[in-house]
Amino acid sequence: MLTNNSLLCLRKLFLSFSIAFNFISLFPSVAFASYPSVSELKDVASTDWAYEALQVLIERYGVMTGYPDGTFKGDKPNGMASLRPLTRYEFATALNEVLQQLEELIAEEKISVESEDLSTLQRLRRDFANELVTLESRVDKLEKRTALIEANQFSTTTKLTTLVVSGATGGGFDGDNIVGVTGDEITTDDPNATLFYRTTLAFNTSFNGTDALVTWLEIGSNGIDDNTGGFLEPTFGSVLDYSAKPPVEELGVSRLYYTFSPSERLNLTFGSTLALTDYIDTNSYITPSFLNFSTLALAQNYILFPIQGLGAGAAVEWNPVERIKVKAAYVAASADEPSSDNSSFTPGIFPIGYILYPDGESKGGLFGDPYQGAVEIEFTPVNPVIIRFQYTGGEILGKRFDVVGANFEWAISERVAVFGRYGYGSYNNTVFGDINPNYWMVGISFPDLFVSGVISGVAVAQPFIADEIGDATQTNIEAFYNFPINDNIRITPLVQIITNAANQNSNGAIFSGTLRTVFSF
């Protein structure tokens, strides 16, 4: 009779055999590397003693392996059963399964095993000893690989992606000096060349596959001042966009929100840290700035977002019909501060706010100043053309602003596209009086120029057209060529030109060049 201890010993021998075969069946290209292929081993035909012996065990003890009828199937010509040969690995797996089921039946005291069957099992083990040794070796290696994968798995629900933007920039200007919006002197010398960086760690967590909890940690170099354009003209958007946005020289949370879809055409977002520019006024050939145009005045409609920073709020995206999208968003830049004043820097307000309202005061709070709400309607009259209309309004430093804007893009062909923006604003009770600034930009993009995967373009903008400020109108021009080294690295040389910086005719042209490198993984 076959005892429980005997069966346990046999089962241990065959268990690794079965595990290895199952893995090999799923991943043959991995498992059989550097080993003989199955075709090189002798199959177990239905006429072999081992095959017949296993069939006897299956039938005698009522255990089942292979298919529900206890066979391994095959072609049935003329209605007659003709079982196909088994590979030695398939046979070993079947043998282990029979042994496992026998053990379970004995443990439940449902059967007793004859001694002759024990001899049969021992002979089967001896005849398949070589395969067992080989497979045990493979199982050890596969277990180590599996353990390594499990140990390095970040999370089953969270995906971590990383973005590193870095580069070198330098440049200078014509003339004797550079002055700001109010005529104050910024510098008389060309700035030194600088290195800048921005690193983003993005954690995207999904609980049901249709939602996302988004958390970004970011750190950047010296903000506006780490690049030539931002140093020489900090007021009207000549700064590199990705230099102005992240926390300055310290690691901080730059996005924290939860987004979900209660229905197929509706998406809702709310959180303590989000940005309006993630939802409003995007453009396929302009954003994101780390892949396209770097100049802030080109990356977005400059007068549409006087609150440039981050804040608490919510966003809604609704797609009522196929060619129309409606978006709405609200952000309060000082939602975590119950009160505030102008004695210290108010987060979220860009320098133009302090130029217009030097004596203004903020209130703070979720519904207090500074805050901004925005609505956008996106219309696609024909597939290559997209038009967006926006309205934004809010308060900064105790004063009201309202702005309307438009944004379009047109893919003329696979290799050429044109795009542009326009904005008209109303800023009341500024230090210059009630003003109505205008903004415009136009550009052309050349996807896959010379090399597949390239992103390139040229654009020009006048970010703040207002007769009340200065005696000229600033113009920003940028050209870039974004070249992919591989799927994870892109290098972009770009050139920026600024004329009449800060709306001052006395300022000579500013020239700067940047070599931007983006790593994403």
Image (spheres, rainbow, N blue to C red):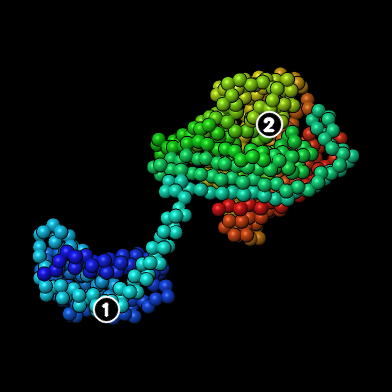
Q: Quadrant of the N terminus?
A: bottom left
Q: Residues within 10 Å of mark 2 (few under 14, many from 20)?
A: many
Question: Percent x, y for residue 399?
Answer: 66, 20
| Label 1 sits on residue | 43
Q: Is residue 136 above or below residue 47?
A: above
Q: Is residue 465 above or below residue 65?
A: above
User: Residue at left 51%, top 32%?
Assistant: 271
User: Residue at left 15%, top 72%?
Assistant: 118
Q: Residues within 10 Å of mark 1 (few under 14, many from 20)?
A: some
| Label 2 sits on residue | 350
Question: Percent x, y for residue 277?
Answer: 59, 36
| Amino acid at circle 1 | Asp
Q: How many marks?
A: 2
Q: Quadrant of residue 460?
A: top right
Furthest-front residue in view? 5
Q: Nearer the viewer, residue 296 or 9?
A: 9
| Amino acid at circle 2 | Phe
